[in-house]
Image (cartoon, rainbow, N blue to C red):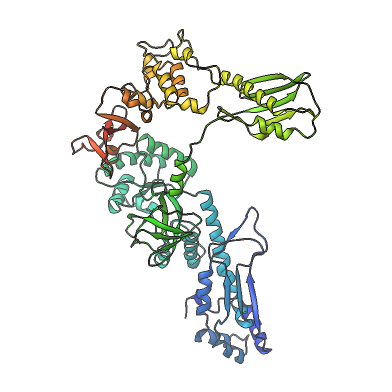
Amino acid sequence: MNNATESALLTDLYQLTMLQAYFDKSMDDTAVFEFFVRKLPENRNFLLAAGLEQVLDYLEDLRFSAEELHWLRNCGRFHERFVDSLADLRFTGEVWAMPEGTPFFANEPILRVVAPLREAQLVETRIINLLQFQTLIATKASRVRLVAPDSLLVDFGLRRAHGAEAGLLSARTSFLAGFDGTSNVQAGMRWNIPLFGTMAHSFIQAHEDELTAFEDFSHSHPKATTLLIDTYDTEAAARAIVPLARKLSGEGIGIQAVRIDSGDLGRHAVRVRAILDEGVLPNIFSPDAPKALGEYVGKVKDLRRDSLVVAGTASFANGDGLCYLDAKHELEGFRVNRAVGNRLFPHQMPAGLRPGLALYRNQDQAFERLLQGRSAERRLSLRMLFSATEDGFRLVASMDEASASVDIAFEHQPAKSPQKENIVQELSKLGTTHFSVRPEDVSVEVGTWFVPRSLLAQARREVVEKLSAQVLAPVSVPDSHEVVAAQTSQVEAGPRTTQEATDPRMIQEAVATQKPQETATPGRPLEAQRWQRQYETFPYTYNIANADAARLYASCGLPGLSKAYEKGGAEDLPQHPADLIMQCRHCLRYALGYCVRRGGKRPQWREPLHLVLPDGRQFRLEFDCQDCQMNVYAEK
C-alpha cells in the first residue's frame, strides 16, 4: 500500500458519493474550482501563498491502487460499475495558481482547477488540506521575518508538529517564507534547507558536570559550537563559559552562541548577554551570523549557466558584492557584473551555489553612491508665530527654552487674497543658517491684513540673528574665574553660516587662538580634561573639523587642541613614526586567544603586527593592555 499521504482515499467520503452520482447520470462536463479565503483573520493584512508544489505532485501521481479498489467494492457503499471506472481515473485538467511566496488577500483566488467534473470534485479535499496548512505556516513565518529582518530564524517545530507530514511541510514552508534553516534532517536532505542543531539537556545530564559536557561538545563540533546553558542554572553556566571560551580560543575553537529555551527568556537573555560582555566575550559570535555576513537579500531561486535568479524583495546594482555559506559552511562570495531586476550575472559563476541558498550583500553600490553625495546637515528645529500688533506685526521664534521676537511697524492694509500660504513659505526660508522650521510649525494670526514679502524677510533675518546670539553663545565652565581667550575673541554675536563653520581658515584661526594651559581650570582637574593619554600625544583625535567644535572645546577649558586628522591636524605636530587613526575595544590579540591578562597564551610572534591592504598600505597595531584597547596607526 502507498504511503497514507499519497493515497487517493485521503479524501472526504462525500467526494466519492458525489462521484458515483455524477457517474450514474453521465455528468462529466468541464468544471472550475477555485481556492480562496473569504475573510482575513483579525489583525492580519495579508496571507502568503504556499503548498503549490505538493498540490502538483499529488495531481500528477493521483490513481487508485488495486488494494484501494478492492476495499471500495467490499465496503458496501458503491456499486461495481462505478468502482471499475475509478481504475483508470487520472487527473487530466489544468491548474492556474499564484507562485508560492506571493502575498494575497480576501476573496482573491490563489489556485484554480479546470478539469472534468469528477476529477475536479475528487481532488478538492486534498488540495485544500495542502494549501491551507502551508499557507498558514508561510504567513506566520513571514510575519516573524518582518519583525526580525536581520535575525537568524530557524524552524525547530518537528517534535511538536501534528504528525510527520506537518513537521516536514512546516520546515519547507518556513524556509520558503524567509527562515534561515531547520532542525528537520529529512527536510534538509529533500529540499536542501540548511540544518541547525545544538544539544539537548540529556547530553548535559549524561556527563558528570556541565562544564565537561560543554568542553566535550566543543571538541566534537569545533566549527559549530552552540552551548545549551539552562539545564541547571542559566546564569551560573554563562559565567562558567567565560574561562572555557578563553581556553578553547587557544585551541582554535570559538563558541558561536549560547542557547536558552526555558525560564524567563527575556530576563535570562539580558543577564546572560551582560555576563558575557563583562567577561570580555562580546565575540561569542559566529562568522555565519547575519550581522557578519551583511544584509540578507533573499535566496537563490534559479540557476542558469551564467546567471542566477534571487527570490526576495531587494534591488541590486552592477558591482554589488554578495556572499553565502557553501555546503561545508565556508564563506564564499562573488561580484555582480550585471543586474537585470532580480536576475544577476556574476563576474564569474560560483561553483557552490544551489537553489534555496541564502544570499547576503556585503558591498552595496547604491549605498556607496549615497555616501558620496552631500552629507546630511544637522539643524535646530524652530517654532514660529507671526501675528498682527496695533502698529504692525510681530514674529516670535522659539526652541526648547530659548526664544526671540521682532516687532516691525507697518500700516495695516486689507489683503486682496489669503496671506497664510505666502507667509509660511517666506518664513520657512532659513537657508544656510543653523535652523530649520517645518511649515506645520509656523502659526499665522494676521487676520485679513496684507504683509509684503520684504517685511517677512526682514523679520525672519532679525529674529534668527537674535536667536543665534542666545543658542550659539559659548558654554561657560562652572566655577571658572577665567575665560579662555578664544571664548571672547572668536565667538560672534551674529549668525554664522554652515559654510563659515566649516571654512578651513576659520578652523585654523579658532584653533590657533587656543593657549595651552599649564594648570587646571578651577573646578575641573587637569586629568579630567585629558580623557585618554593618546589625546595628549595626538590632539587631533578630538576631531575638531569645524570652528564650532573648536569654540566648544575652548569654552570647556581643554588645552592643546589641534585640527582633525582629515583637516591636516597631524601636520601640526612634531614628527611621529605613525599617526593614530583608530582606537577600539575589539582586540585581535584577544580574539586569537593570546591575551595574557585574560587567561590566554603568551604570543609566539614578534610585535608590532600590521594590517596590510591590497594596495600595500600598512597600519601598525598597538595593544594597549593598560586601557584594554587596540590602537591602529597609519605608517608614514
- Residue 132: x and y in percent read 58, 65
Q: 185 or 329: nearer the eye?
A: 329
Q: Report if residue 484 is visible in the image.
A: no
Q: Which residue is drawn at 47% across and 13% down?
A: 489
Q: Report if residue 416 is visible in the image.
A: yes
Rendered view: 341 above or below 581: below
Q: 295 or 232: nearer the eye?
A: 295
Q: Residue at x 43, y 10 (%)?
A: 522
Q: Which residue lies furthest to the top in this view?
A: 481
Rendered view: 65 above or below 157: below
* Drawn side of residue 499 relative to residue 122, left or right: left
* Label total for image: 0
Rendered view: 404 above or below 34: above
Q: Residue furthest bottom?
A: 81
* Drawn side of residue 363 relative to residue 169, left or right: left
- Residue 539: x and y in percent read 35, 23
- Residue 224: x and y in percent read 33, 52
Q: 105 or 222: nearer the eye?
A: 105
Quarter assignment of residue 24:
bottom right
Q: Residue at x 48, y 38 (%)?
A: 374
* Drawn side of residue 38 relative to residue 241, left or right: right
- Residue 354: x and y in percent read 39, 63
Quarter of the image with the C terminus is: top left
